[in-house]
Amino acid sequence: MTTFSTILVANRGEIACRVMRTARALGYRTVAVYSEADADAPHVAMADRAVCIGPAPVGQSYLQMQAIIDAAKKSGADAIHPGYGFLSENSAFAQACADAGITFIGPPIRAIELMGSKRLSKIAMLEAQVPCVPGYEGADQSEATLMAEAKRIGFPVMLKASAGGGGRGMRMVREEGELLAMIRTAKSEAKNAFGSDELIIEKAVINPRHVEIQVFGDTHGNVIYLGERDCSIQRRHQKVVEEAPCPVMTPHLRRAMGEAAVNAAKAVDYTGAGTVEFLLDGEKFYFLEMNTRLQVEHPVTEMVTGQDLVAWQIRVAAGEKLPLTQDEVKLAGAAIEVRLYAEDPTNHFLPQTGPIHLWQPASGDGVRIDHGIASGGEVSPHYDPMLAKVIAYGDTREDARRRLIRALEDTALVGVTTNKRFLLAILRNETFASGVFGTAFIAEHMAAHPSLQPTRASSTECALALALLQDAGNTGARPLRSGLLVPRPALLGDGHGKVPATLVETTATRGRAFTVTVGDARHEIGVLARCGDTLRVEVDGVRCTVVARVDGAKVLLDTGDGVVAVEDLSLAAPAAADGVGSGLLKAPMDGAIVAINLAAGDRVEKGQLVIVLEGMKIQHQITADVTGTLKSINVSIGTQVKSRHLLAVIEPDTAA
């Protein structure tokens, strides 16, 4: 048995909070580490002790192994849980913990090393007779060899970063003509993201299901599986929705996949939590990769098994046997999870930064929300844009789906833009509800969905916003007598258009009442009660609760589907003409400049790549919006920029 009493969690945000919740419940002291940017973060306040480990960038803080080891020694931590992400699958970190006499709550070093390489792990799985997708996993990484192997396998093929995941360094190549460019792009992205440009190539399996098996091993030779998770709803190879069990799973198929996953784990003498991912094509399945850590989506497994997987990790690290045998594992009900991201689905899912004015997670039977954010916080450009996981459980899949929709509607985040509306659209989709879909679901069913287009505020939302501005005293109207107002004209904008409106205050037996005309529509609005940013209102005779934040002449309004911003533009100054086609290239988000393709004085064509910016682990290509001459470049490689920072100026060609 291994004895430890204080666990340092080498992670941040919802991950650190999730691990600390269980550690504290088991009676352990907890230690948080934090960057300078996270000094006031919830995970820091939650821990018994906390140690600053460096500046905001992850390379100077959360990825600094020695700083974390030093923090453990300083705080008295005798065990480290890496969470998921960051150093969780870093064998050198596990070795550093061992060298320092600190228990690493994770798998053996050899397993991390082997499974951390898609190339080497696939070779090991082939030797263990685990079904694998045909491909190339050789050591020769020359462009000539990779091109020859791709042609041998036959198009379409998938290029994958051997050292990575999350869709980075991954490209589908459908024809030979695009192969070389894709190889170079995948290698570059893999090198930047993971420090290695090694690739593997696999035959592309078109529209399979992505199904993963949760495995667990202990130091006594026991390895079991705890059912499966379906992670087929993906965007750019990143999971969006996860659920357990898989909607099309049969007992026979579950047993076959589970036994294959256990064989994979036994092949590397695995202990602790691990996930073996497969592509499921009908009744055939193929090994994809093994993640030597807890997964983001582990809550759905916890809900259908009734087990705490973090508690299992801690018990295994302490030398205990697994709490259950394979025969004792029982699955009951269904659970679905969605990932709430700070991103803008209407702008190619561009990651977003900014304030969290209000965070109000839902609650209720069968609802679980894992998060590490709080009202008054800030989403910075230095970390992954995932903010929270919203999970719901039910006796049936439909019960879970319905509960999850309600939970997501009732979860309010006002401030930074999120993907909430997009998530709701997926959950409400009839094909998703049927359970019959594959990894191409988003491309097939959501590509032209209204949730991916800028959302206009409805006349009702505009009327409610103007009434709330008046109720908060943020208008220029003046009382005439007995609470009555002179009819007040206004010009309302939602960022996508403008509409004239008129407001008149009327008598009310409770709160304040207004008649608001928006365009040709007339609405009766009552503001009945207010508790912070949560209001009880009556809209055209129907009472309901809304979340709204009044900020100057703007109202950020969430009525359930997502946030719309309505602003009184009556006194606003005219906007500057620096939009699309202006020649002013601005940063779409906070980040760092990683490439500059042209120099001042160069000719540039509209659509030509000028600058590459990296933020929130994603590279963004900044292209010319006009044809002309590059007048100036205002940044250099390595420059850290804020959103809307002027990067370059193009002098457009004058019309003939």
Image: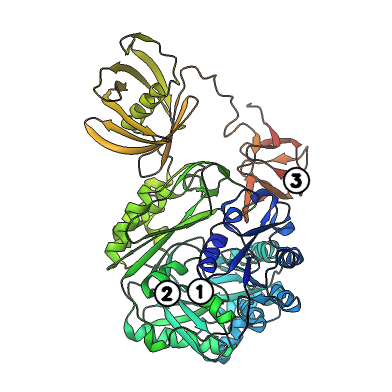
Q: Tell me, yes or no, whether the two marked residues, 2 and 1, touch with CB atoms within 8 Å.
A: yes
Q: Position of residue 549 (x, y in %)?
A: 45, 34
Mark 1: which amino acid? Answer: Ala
Residue bearing the label numbered 2: 307
**Relative to 118, is 308 on the left or the right?**
left
User: Which secondary structure lies at badge 1?
Assistant: helix
Q: Position of residue 102 (x, y in %)?
A: 70, 75
Mark 3: which amino acid? Answer: Thr
Q: Position of residue 538 (x, y in %)?
A: 27, 31
Task: Find the residue positioned furthest to the left.
Answer: 541
Task: Find the residue positioned furthest to the top.
Answer: 480
> Does residue 477 lie above or below 365 as drawn?
above
Q: Nearer the viewer, mark 2 or mark 3?
A: 2
Snapshot quadrant of residue 508: top left
**Are there few (<14), some (14-19), or many (20+) residues within 10 Å of tag 2?**
some
User: Which secondary structure lies at badge 3?
Assistant: loop
Q: Quadrant of the N terminus?
A: bottom right
Q: Position of residue 532 (x, y in %)?
A: 43, 35
Going from N to C along the chain, the mark reached first, 2 or 3, is 2
Q: Which mark is residue 192?
A: none
Write the residue at 38% across / 49% down: 449
Residue bearing the label numbered 1: 311
* Disc 3/disc 1 C-alpha distance (Å): 43 Å
Q: Quadrant of the C terminus?
A: top right
Q: Is residue 182 visible?
A: yes
Of 462 and 29, the residue lying toward us: 29
Write the residue at 44% across / 67% down: 299
Mark 2: which amino acid? Answer: Gln
Q: Is residue 81 visible?
A: no
Q: Which mark is residue 639?
A: 3
Snapshot quadrant of residue 186: bottom right
**Relative to 278, is 202 on the left or the right?**
right
